[in-house]
Amino acid sequence: MALVVIGGVAAGLSAAARARRLDSHLEIVVLEKGPVISYGACGLPYFVEGRVRDAGQLIVYTPEYFRKERRIEVRTGARVVAISHPRREVTLETGGRVHYDRLVIATGARCDTSGFAGAGQPHVFTLHTLDDAERMRRFLDEKKPRRAVVIGAGYIGVEAADALRRNGLRVTMLERSQHALLRDEPWITAAVRKQLEEHGVELRCGVSVQGIEVDRVADVPCDMVVVSAGFKPNVEIATAAGVEAGRSGAIRTSERMETNLNGVYAAGDCAEVMHLVTGRPTYIPLGTTANKAGRVAGANAAGGRERFGGIVGTSIVGIFGTGFATTGLSVEQARREGFSPVAARIEAQARPRYFQGRKTTVELVADRGTRRLLGGAVIGEEGAAGRINVIAGALQSRLRVDDFEQLDLAYSPPFATVWDPLLIAAQQLMKEL
């Protein structure tokens, strides 16, 4: 039996590797349109910044590794342009065809710049692939730009702004919505703006960019532009073959990561997954989800019976040394989903003062009727990742605030206070409820 995987980064290679573990006789072919596979896309901003010296450090595995160690054929520069499910074959841009019995679609997503006139100019960049990062690094080294505009204040946008500012550029961020980090909470946007401004980056929200000129965007002069808006799943080839897309525009999948076509699976940034708080399909493209969902897709393509339970949408981004982390639903998101949200937000020491502890902000959101936790956010220089992961675990376990407030969390002065900020927030939320 032949398994073909379209896409050779996180979800695609996780699927191929998992399928090989379950079936040593399966013929597996991975088709990747780009020149490299298995690279850490989340490390791209740090290569642009200069903290990662060599782009090759971001490459985890090579095609040769998969051929020799996993007996998986990986073809780079193999762009798939069509899928014919009745014939069980995919067509390559070169005209070649590859037969499959089972198919995993892991085509990822892209930063769609078609909505920005002038996006094809040499001083305009996206930051989505290894080639994007290398081109940006060369531009910084050779052209020595002084002013940059970043379009979009999502995760990639703030990381790009951080990297460019550390290279000495004056940076202005333009965001179409009124909110940063894709989170409709004014207090988070205010915190992001404060952190950016303290380090010389200006954030302007409510600015719709129509086009990019040679020396300016909107009314902001610049000699370099990074577009980090217009993120879209790559689904065109799949939908043309009869694969159904969900409400988000990404590929609709079952808990087995199977599409509506028998034997065709999808995972990664091109696919929807289940949101465990709302109980509905969602599209939140993250590397953690891509790897886990890819494993499930590969297992089932190899004849297994595995399921991907879903996500709660946990993420964290560093902005000039401070972690901004969120999980689950914001107050407004919870209200739109039909909950009756109640929130509590506190500021407390991450460690005792005599251990030079800095302040951490924690917000918890719960449903008034059921007292079930719905979401949370953590902002701080110390322990933000660990604390947001505790909240994520509580969401996945459907904990009530009453139970969360009783969690047995570790305490030692070098690491935490006797009353962890999470527990203080939970106590405050209990009062609100």
Image (cartoon, helix red, strand yellow):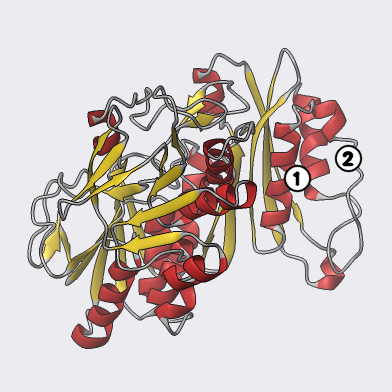
Q: Say if 218 sits above or below 278 in the image.
A: below
Residue annotated with mark 1: 390
Q: Residue 44, position in %: x, y?
A: 41, 68
Residue at 63% x, 52% y is: 21
Q: Say if 50 sits above or below 291 in the image.
A: below
Q: Residues within 10 Å of mark 1 (few under 14, many from 20)?
A: some
Q: Say the numbered circle drawn on residue 429.
A: none
Query: Horizontal placement of 289 versus 108: left or right?
Result: right
Q: Between residues 185 and 24, which one lies in front from this camera angle?
A: 24
Real-space Cα distance between discs 1 and 2? 10 Å
Q: Amino acid at mark 2?
A: Leu
Per the image, label 1 sits on a secondary structure element best described as: helix
Decide if residue 347 is in sight here. no
| Quarter-of-image position of residue 85 | top left
Q: Residues within 10 Å of mark 2 (few under 14, many from 20)?
A: few
Q: Residue 410, position in %: x, y?
A: 90, 54
Residue annotated with mark 2: 407
Per the image, label 2 sits on a secondary structure element best described as: loop
Q: Residue 236, position in %: x, y?
A: 24, 36
Q: Say if 143 sits above or below 77 in the image.
A: below
Query: Horizontal placement of 236 versus 179: left or right?
Result: left
Callout 1 touching callout 2 (CB < 8 Å): yes
Q: Amino acid at mark 1?
A: Val
Q: Residue 305, position in %: x, y?
A: 64, 31
